[in-house]
Amino acid sequence: SPPDSSFPSNATAAGFAIAAGLGFGSRRMGALAYVLAGTLGFARIYGGVHYPLDVLIGALVGYGSSYLIRIILPYLEPLPTWLLKIGQKVHLA
């Protein structure tokens, strides 16, 4: 049994976050990844590790976090560019 509580399912959250990230780039790869993530979630329920609500909330957390990153990332992009310019000026990059 897992060492921590089962709510939400961390494995399902990670699976759906990866699936969403792939789905934003390629619909075909995303569809395959969603099937695999759903299978993972079902296996966790079938194996008795999680309740169905644990898996459902894990899937929502995973998708939601990936979607949030997708929205925020364009606003954060100037920061690495700015840091690289500073690094080049002081001969670090």
Image (cartoon, rainbow, N blue to C red):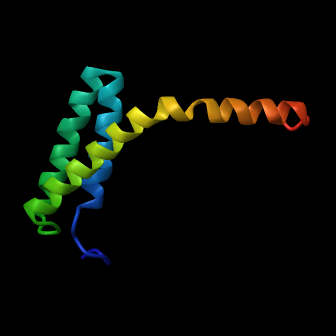
Which quadrant is home to the N terminus? bottom left
Residue 38 image offset from top left, x and y in percent: 16, 45
| Picture quadrant where residue 92 is located | top right
Residue 81 image offset from top left, x and y in percent: 68, 29
Confirm whether residue 21 shows in the render: yes
Q: Nearer the viewer, residue 35 or 74?
A: 74
Please tell me how many numbered marks the rendered image carries. 0
Please tell me which residue is depicted at 48% across the width and 34% down the height of the picture.
73
Please tell me which residue is depicted at 32% across the width and 26% down the height of the picture.
24
Which quadrant is home to the C terminus? top right
Q: Nearer the viewer, residue 19 or 67?
A: 67
| Picture quadrant where residue 37 is located | top left
Rendered position, 23 above or below 45: above
Residue 54 image offset from top left, x and y in percent: 16, 62
Confirm whether residue 93 shows in the render: no
Please tell me which residue is depicted at 18% across the width and 56% down the height of the picture.
57
Residue 46 located left or right of residue 25: left
| Picture quadrant where residue 55 is located | bottom left
Residue 2 image offset from top left, x and y in percent: 28, 74
Please tell me which residue is depicted at 39% across the width and 33% down the height of the picture.
71
